Amino acid sequence: MTATDVPTAAPRARHAGWALALICVAQLMVILDATIANIALPYIQADLEVSDHALTWVITAYALTFGGFLLLGGRCGDLFGRRRAFTFGLVLFAVASLVGGFAQNEAMLLGSRAAQGLGAAFASPNALALITTTFEPGPRRSRAFAVYGMMSGLGAAVGLLLGGWLTGLDPTWFGIDVAGWRLTFLINVPIGIAGALAAPRLLAESDTHAGRLDVPGALTATSGLLALVYGITRAGDESHGWGERWTVVSLVTGVALLVVFALVERGVRAPMLPGRILASRDRMASYAVMALIPAAMFTMFFFLTLVLQNVLGETPMRTGLMFLPFSIVIISAAMVVSRLVQRVDPGRLSALGATIAAVAVFGFSRLPYDDRAGQVAVEISYWTDVFPYIVLMPIGMSLVFIPMTMSVVHGVAPADSGIASGVLNTMQQVGGALGLATLSTIALNAATSKGEELCREAVTAGGSCADPAFGAVAFTHGANVGFLWCSAMLLAGGVIALLFNRLRHQDLAVGGPGAPAAAPAPAAH
């Protein structure tokens, strides 16, 4: 391949509309796969006889490799071509999904999930980078980012809806019974293969750059992120917790390796993570916000799904349908926000969105229950206690995701857009895992305390602790506490966006003063 030290003007896709559709479908596939298997977990456990401990790894294995290899995937796209890295990620994701769909044992399934995460780590950051090389700054790029942001926010809700529907199916393919949970993996195969075949026809390849991959940086960054994500996820498991030995070892090792990574990068001429990516205050503020907001959103989906199924007793399919308004509203909201970003500064727009989302999550924190002695019961109504806030939440999410994503890639040289996108995805994954682990611990402690309180009151009144309503009330109380902290996290993100992201909407429209988005990057060696 031909290397160039100075990137030329960003290449244009041959069919911009179809290119955007391809990029966004791939992004949707990657994001929804983080949640699509959640509803199927009981069926996977029964069919493959997976242990309770190993069952959590169906989710963790994907999150671990996805979060751990994102920087590597983004940087490989910068050096060797983003379309090439994007296509590699899609092919790996499709093959891994095929293996997972026909898994015959625990090891085969978990290995496929880890390979899916690796594929996603190459596809996702390069999907975002390809938007910057396909659409010039202005209204068309704003609309493209709106659709991309919509897909990112839509993924979790669509995953729950699609997972609920597919899990209920039990078809036969070529004389082979295909249990419904297997379809949550197999559905990715035709999408991934079709995307990989379409990429060379629809997407223009980005410039490649001279020099080799920063191997010491790649090893320390990837190992550090793997250890950090593993420790955070392990901390969120109630059977381990934050104080457990291997949790602490993993977290300390992860932080130490990332410190080594930072030191290594200072002495490398062509670092894996160039310091110029982190030199912008506006971009750093956007990274911080995009760590806090997904953390709150993932936690909201986690708690609300459990409340609907475990407390209200809803089926997987009905639970997925209850999230359908989220999907519908975020599509409409994203189109409106694509026009607003051309008129309102991104920091202000994101602050407004974070505040709206905080109000919605605060509404979830008011889920009603009666904990009076002799009258313990959960009194949740979907239409009055859940639906209004499921509609409000995606409005706030759109107002945050789209301007903050645009702020991250604003002013980034074409040679660095892959790694800038990789850092963004890393912040989302690590922030989401950290937020969920932390808030799950807080909620679990609150639920345990509430259960003990109800039990004491029942014994004092001459009763017993056997009432099943105690558990439902205790869990609802714990979820409410978790939602309340989520709301505070969202407000914190809004404050950061308002105070530290000083970009103007005019900058985003033209690529910034002097068009820095097209500025040449230093030569790689």
Image (tube, rainbow, N blue to C red):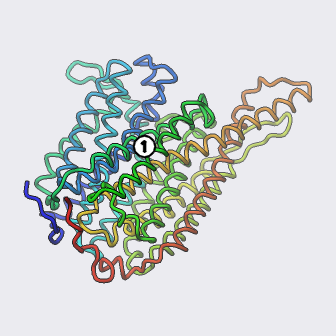
Residue ID for mark 1: 224
Residue 196 appears in view: yes
Q: Looking at the picture, tell me which residue is in the foreground, 53 or 157.
A: 53
Going by the picture, which residue comes out furthest to the front?
A: 267
Q: Is residue 183 left or right of residue 369?
A: left
At a point 24% along the width and 44% down the height, the residue shown is 89
At a point 29% along the width and 55% down the height, the residue shown is 24
In this rendering, the count of numbered labels is: 1
Q: Looking at the picture, tell me which residue is in the foreground, 334 or 515.
A: 515
User: Dot 1 surroundings within 10 Å: few (below 14), some, or many (20 or more)?
Assistant: many
Going by the picture, which residue comes out furthest to the right?
A: 461
x, y (%) of residue 330?
43, 59
x, y (%) of residue 412?
31, 68
At a point 58% along the width and 56% down the height, the residue shown is 389
Q: Amino acid at mark 1?
A: Gly
Q: Looking at the picture, tell me which residue is in the foreground, 448 or 167.
A: 448
